[in-house]
Amino acid sequence: MGLKKAITNVRIIILVVFILLSLVAVHPSFGREGVAIRNVMRNGSAAEAGIKSPQPNAQPMSREIILAMNNVPIQTMDDYYAFTKDLDLNRTIQVKTNKGLYRLATKPLTETIILNETETLIINETVAVNQTINGTIVTTNETRQRWMVVPKTKTNIIGVQDLGMTIYEAPTTNLRKGLDLQGGTRVVLKPETAVSDDDMGILLANMQQRLNVFGLSDVTVRKTKDLIGDQFIVVEIPGANEEEVKELLAKQGKFEAKVGNDTVFRGGSDITYVCRSAECSGLDPRVGCGQGQGGQVCRFQFSITLSPGAAQHQADLTADLDVITQDSDKYLSKQLDLYLDDELVDSLNIGADLQGRAVTDIAISGSGSGPDRQGAVNDALKGMKRLQTILITGSLPVKLSVVKADTISPVLGKEFVSNAILVTLTSIVCVIVIIFIRYRKAILGIPIAITLLSEVLLMLGLAAVVGWNLDLAAIAGIIVATGTGVDDQIVIIDEVLKRKGMAMQVSWKEKIKNAFFIIFGSYFTVVVAMVPLLFAGAGLLKGFAFTTIAGVSFGVFVTRPAFAAFIEIFLKE
């Protein structure tokens, strides 16, 4: 009789509906095999085969999963790395995923060596030419050739490139793990000046684009404030290097090319194309690497395409410059100076044949240094990649300073999750035992356990729906919310049972009403206490405050009314 009343009670039915919706949102799929694709590098083997990089906000269970490579099952990350560590050159690999079948071709990893010989290169340039036709100035593009004598180079194959994608363990739920649980880098940045809402939107979009262009995915970029109104930006990137992220984001990234004191073009809108493929970017074959102060120095070079307006502006600024001869080559009297964040990073000679010509295709160069050749090569290519990123995305609306930066190991996160699950289950058992000792009613343990587990599940379902990252602060909020839940359940039990055996009897409705008067008082106290924490510590405590408020709200409006209905039904019986 009591069970029939329970399954037809409206408050219990509401709880069951919320539980089912939470299960759908979390989408548990334990024992899932394969490895998930975290990021696909541009121009890599995976990208050329048609594998797409996942969207940053995509749900974890929607990620593409690698199931097999050349019919060899890939069940873990160890299987993937064991298969890819000894790949042969010019080999075609068949990759099977949960979304299709792809054929990847392995690419060579090469090294360029400069020889003591020279060769003549013929370079085609597109030039804008102004003509007057019937009194109207008409601009047309002409292709012209020029010759350049450069050192000969020799390219050696020194290995095989990776497949151009990063992977991680296949997710088993739609819950997003924060950096505390999966490892990575968190950087807290502060704008040097106040930023309007419109500029903040531009700033966040630009930072997101920079990180994506640079090859970083699963990026979380969000704004926040502290209690006194200071603005902050929190960037969280799984698996990224702290120094790399700080270097990319902390600087404004304002790029300018100047002739004298006049700006020729800027990064962003003045640049229509930046080459990042091996055919037109990499170590400069004319200069290569050489001995510098304190070690080796390598120069890089890549081509860019200017907008017609920027090309014409360059032509106007060079039209009246003098021509000088240097080492039998003719150059203009002023160089093209490259500035990054108002610091001179390189100066390029301007060929005499470019005087007054609106050339859209030009080359940008720079250098990197290191204690040995390999260190210099890595530094040069890293600097080239950063400069290319800034030329594509343009400068940030405001300079940012690093307030805090953390790199978190994923090993501790896995141990914490296992311990948290064990402690949660142990605490539920302890609560049930204590309730039994206090009230001597074994039946009370069932609704208490169901209520505690339901509150946790409802909070996880909400996190899956809104895409909230579960970190240590969020888990602490879940613990606080379930702790208040136990307290409220004891209040309900006490109010129901305290007058038993007394001459004056109080109705069940009045007992429950008295219990919920206490519960709502506690609820509003917790919510008021949590609201300031949404903004404290540059927003790093937001997960704790959010999950605590969500948890006690689910408890007051969903789980505890169902618990009261269960107690009322079965204790009456």
Image (spheres, rainbow, N blue to C red):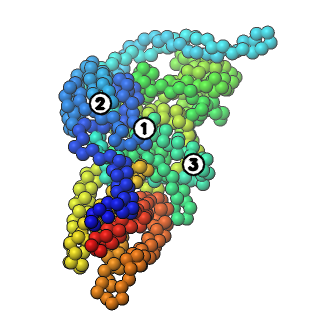
**Secondary structure under badge 1?**
loop
**Secondary structure under badge 3?**
helix
How far apart are the two marked residues, 3 and 1, measured between alpha carbons? Answer: 22 Å
Residue sitting farthest toward the front: 1
Q: How many C-alpha atoms fall within 10 Å of the one at disc 3: few (<14), some, or many (≥20)?
A: some
**94 and 562: which one is in front?**
562
At x 41%, y 16%, the residue is 151
Picture coordinates of residue 113 (x, y %)? 34, 21
Residues at discs 3 and 2 in contact (Cβ within 8 Å): no
Name the side, left or right, on which 483 lies relative to 330.
left
**544 and 345: which one is in front?**
544
* Quadrant of the image occupied by residue 50: top left
Numbered label attached to residue 200: 3
* Mark 3 / mark 1, whichever is N-terminal: 1
Q: Nearer the viewer, mark 3 or mark 1?
A: 1
At x 32%, y 64%, the residue is 5
Q: Nearer the viewer, mark 3 or mark 2?
A: 2
Q: Which of marks 1 and 2 is in front?
A: 2
Picture coordinates of residue 106 (x, y %)? 29, 22
How far apart are the two marked residues, 1 and 2, measured between alpha carbons? Answer: 17 Å
**385 and 449: which one is in front?**
449
At x 36%, y 39%, the residue is 62
Relative height, residue 346 to residue 473 (above, below) = above
Picture coordinates of residue 355 (x, y %)? 64, 19
- Residue at image mark 1: 55
Q: Is residue 15 at least partly visible in the picture?
A: no
The amino acid on which the numbered mark 2 sits, given as a three-letter code, is Thr
* Mark 1 / mark 2, whichever is N-terminal: 1
- Residue at image mark 2: 97
Relative height, residue 23 to residue 81 (above, below) = below
* Quadrant of the image occupied by residue 128: top right
